[in-house]
């Protein structure tokens, strides 16, 4: 078998090895089905059991209340950028409040403006999107259509430490890059959604957790594939869903439940990994610099730079040679980034820290 590297890609990202191994074992024929999950009908009993178990796992992990639905969409997070305002801003007669903390919330704002009025309740641009806002900094409208956040900005490495308090206004959240990294109080959200390719599974499916009353409030004049109400009525099966991706979501959530032991345990591991890496950077005397400010640093994405930018290219090349892959920063900002999602083992972060210390030692006079 081809040697596996430590893959620090921001997405599609590493998947848990036990989930990959089970998918490989059953790829040709699922037990009891006689054919591959890639071949079974989405209307079959076999797939019904798969999607129901994936939902049950998510409900258990996140303690999802009974008055929320779990839906499986295609289209990625960027489709949700449009669906949220299409369903809840267009024609509402209200403005929506967006909290701008980085690239992905900015893109969501651009999409929302095609459907109605947007207020920016906080803009972190003056500090180069290096932190989440304090409660007193939010200029929220109590009559807003909704409040929108990206709980974790992958490019800047900024994560909300806690949910903002928004009163009775529905809180809509793009949790694509930090869902399942820690316990989450779902009841604080109107909609919590995540594309799969960070912590949930492979690219191709997006999980949407939505409160029942918001489903009922969705307008009736939308295309069926863009309506939360119609999609909920169809139980995520309006058209053929991404069956294999949903199957892997089931396997990944099985792993979180059975091998990790739930989200409290996963959070402990994630805190250990992030602290290990950030502590090394903070102790480097300025050789490395974390982009995000303390208190807003992500458990999932550590964006950093080398103070001497001319060293970044050799740093990345030498890291690749050490089987530490995909550490380059996003093309829009450059620098470096280590994405240390749930599936990244502690050993991978230890290997990265060892390399970074050696690289620093060899380039300091």
Image: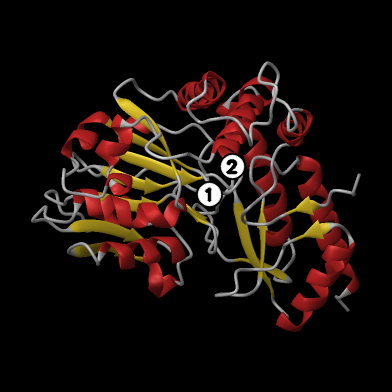
- Tell me the CA gap for discs 1 and 2: 7 Å
In the rendering, at what x and y percent does residue 208 appear? Answer: 40, 39
| Residue located beneath label 1 in the image | 177
Q: Quadrant of the C terminus?
A: bottom right
At x 76% / y 41%, what residue is drawn?
346
In the rendering, at what x and y percent does residue 80 appear? Answer: 37, 51
- SS under mark 2: loop
Front residue of 328/123: it is 328
Q: Check the image and report above or below for 350 versus 44.
A: below
Q: Quadrant of residue 328?
A: bottom right
At x 24% / y 44%, what residue is drawn?
166
Q: Is residue 362 left or right of residue 240?
A: right
At x 32% / y 64%, what residue is drawn?
111
Q: Quadrant of residue 96?
A: bottom left
In the rendering, at what x and y percent does residue 202 appear? Answer: 61, 45
Q: Quadrant of residue 121?
A: bottom left
| Residue located beneath label 2 in the image | 199
Q: Of the residues under marks 1 and 2, which one precedes in the sequence?
A: 1
Q: In this figure, what is the number of numbered marks?
A: 2
At x 36% / y 61%, what residue is drawn?
108
Q: Check the image and report above or below for 124 versus 75.
A: below
Q: Is residue 312 left or right of residue 67?
A: right
Asked if disc 1 and disc 2 are in contact, CB closer than 8 Å, the reply is yes
Q: Quadrant of the N terminus?
A: top right
Q: Residues within 10 Å of mark 2 (few under 14, many from 20)?
A: many
Q: Check the image and report above or below for 115 versus 315.
A: above
- SS under mark 1: loop
Kindly give the residue lying farthest to the left in the view shown.
93
């Amino acid at each position: 078998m081809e040697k596996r590297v430590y893959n620090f890609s921001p997405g599609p990202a590493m998947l848990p090895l036990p989930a990959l191994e089970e998918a490989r074992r059953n790829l040709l024929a699922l037990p009891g089905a006689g054919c591959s999950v890639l071949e079974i009908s989405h209307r079959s009993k076999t797939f019904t059991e798969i999607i129901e178990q994936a939902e049950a796992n998510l409900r258990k992990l996140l303690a999802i209340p009974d008055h929320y639905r779990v839906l499986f969409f295609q289209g990625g997070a960027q489709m949700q950028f449009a669906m949220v305002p299409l369903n809840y801003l267009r024609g509402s007669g209200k403005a929506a409040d967006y909290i701008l903390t980085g690239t992905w919330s900015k893109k969501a704002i651009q999409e929302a403006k095609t459907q109605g009025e947007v207020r920016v309740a906080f803009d972190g641009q003056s500090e180069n999107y290096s932190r989440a806002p304090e409660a007193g900094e939010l200029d929220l409208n109590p009559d807003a259509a909704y409040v929108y956040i990206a709980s974790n900005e992958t490019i800047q490495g900024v994560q909300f430490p806690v949910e903002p308090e928004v009163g009775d206004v529905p809180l809509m959240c793009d949790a694509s890059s930090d869902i399942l990294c820690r316990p989450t109080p779902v009841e604080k959200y109107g909609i919590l959604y995540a594309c799969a390719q960070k912590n949930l599974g492979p690219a191709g499916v997006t999980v949407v957790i939505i409160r029942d009353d918001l489903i009922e409030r969705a307008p009736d004049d939308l295309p069926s594939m863009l309506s939360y109400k119609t999609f909920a009525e169809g139980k995520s099966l309006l058209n053929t869903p991404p069956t294999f991706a949903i199957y892997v979501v089931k396997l990944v959530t099985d792993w979180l439940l059975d091998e990790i032991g739930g989200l409290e345990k996963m959070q402990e591991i994630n805190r250990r990994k992030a602290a290990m890496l950030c502590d090394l950077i903070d102790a480097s005397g300025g050789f490395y610099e974390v982009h995000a400010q303390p208190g807003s640093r992500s458990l999932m994405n550590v964006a950093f730079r080398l103070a001497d930018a001319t060293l970044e290219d050799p740093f990345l090349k030498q890291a690749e040679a050490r089987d530490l892959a995909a550490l380059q920063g996003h093309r829009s900002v450059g620098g470096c980034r280590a994405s240390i999602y749930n599936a990244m083992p502690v050993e991978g972060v230890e290997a990265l820290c060892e390399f970074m210390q050696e690289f620093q030692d060899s380039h300091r006079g």
